[in-house]
Amino acid sequence: MKNNKLIAEFMGLPYKEQELSYDFSWNWLMPVVEKIESLRNPDGNAYRFTIDMCNAQIEETNIEILGGAYKIDVVYKAVVEFVKYYNLNKNN
């Protein structure tokens, strides 16, 4: 639930932890992927989210999640890693 709360804050949404479904709903997760792809790094390059089989990668970062059991799991993990990365670097 902690990671779902982290994503909700990134999305700028009010939340109640029991209502967050980023970890198992594509309807919740894909708008986050779209927001990530709308952002730019300090050099002006887009973050490009690639989903292939059960792997996920975000270009312009070192985030790469490989060999998950389910596609949604690797995408969720990549999103969580990106939000942590973004929060760490947004003020630099």
Image (cartoon, helix red, strand yellow):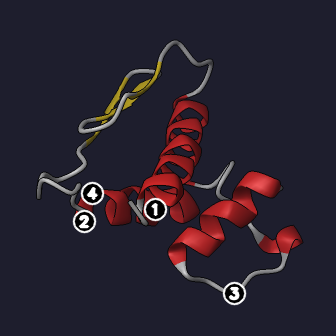
Q: Is residue 86 left or right of residue 50?
A: right
Give me the C-alpha separation between circle 3 and circle 2: 21 Å
Give me the C-alpha separation between circle 2 and circle 1: 10 Å
Quadrant (top left, top right, bottom left, bottom right) of the N terminus: bottom right
Give me the C-alpha separation between circle 3 and circle 4: 22 Å
Q: Name the residue under label 3.
A: 14
Give me the C-alpha separation between circle 4 and circle 1: 9 Å
Identify the element where label 2 is drawn.
helix
In the rendered structure, are the residues bearing label 2 and label 4 in contact, judged by CB atoms less than 8 Å apart? Answer: yes
**Tag of residue 22:** none
Q: Mark 2 points at which residue?
A: 38
Q: In this view, does 16 lie above or below 64?
A: below
Can you tell which quarter of the image residue 20 is in? Answer: bottom right
Task: Mark 4: give few (<14), some (14-19) or many (20+) Cα within 10 Å.
Answer: some
The outermost residue toward the top is: 67
Q: Name the residue under label 4.
A: 37
Earlier sequence position, callout 4 versus callout 1: 1
Earlier sequence position, callout 2 versus callout 1: 1
Q: Which amino acid does label 4 sit on?
A: Glu
Earlier sequence position, callout 3 versus callout 2: 3
Q: Is residue 69 above or below residue 42?
A: above
Q: Which amino acid does label 2 sit on?
A: Ser
Residue in view at x 59 percent, y 37 percent: 77
Give me the C-alpha separation between circle 2 and circle 4: 4 Å
Quadrant (top left, top right, bottom left, bottom right) of the C terminus: bottom left
Q: Mark 1 points at which residue?
A: 32
Q: Which amino acid does label 3 sit on?
A: Pro
Task: Mark 2: give few (<14), some (14-19) or many (20+) Cα within 10 Å.
Answer: few
Can you tell which quarter of the image residue 9 is in? Answer: bottom right
Identify the element where label 1 is drawn.
helix
Residue in view at x 23 percent, y 44 percent: 48
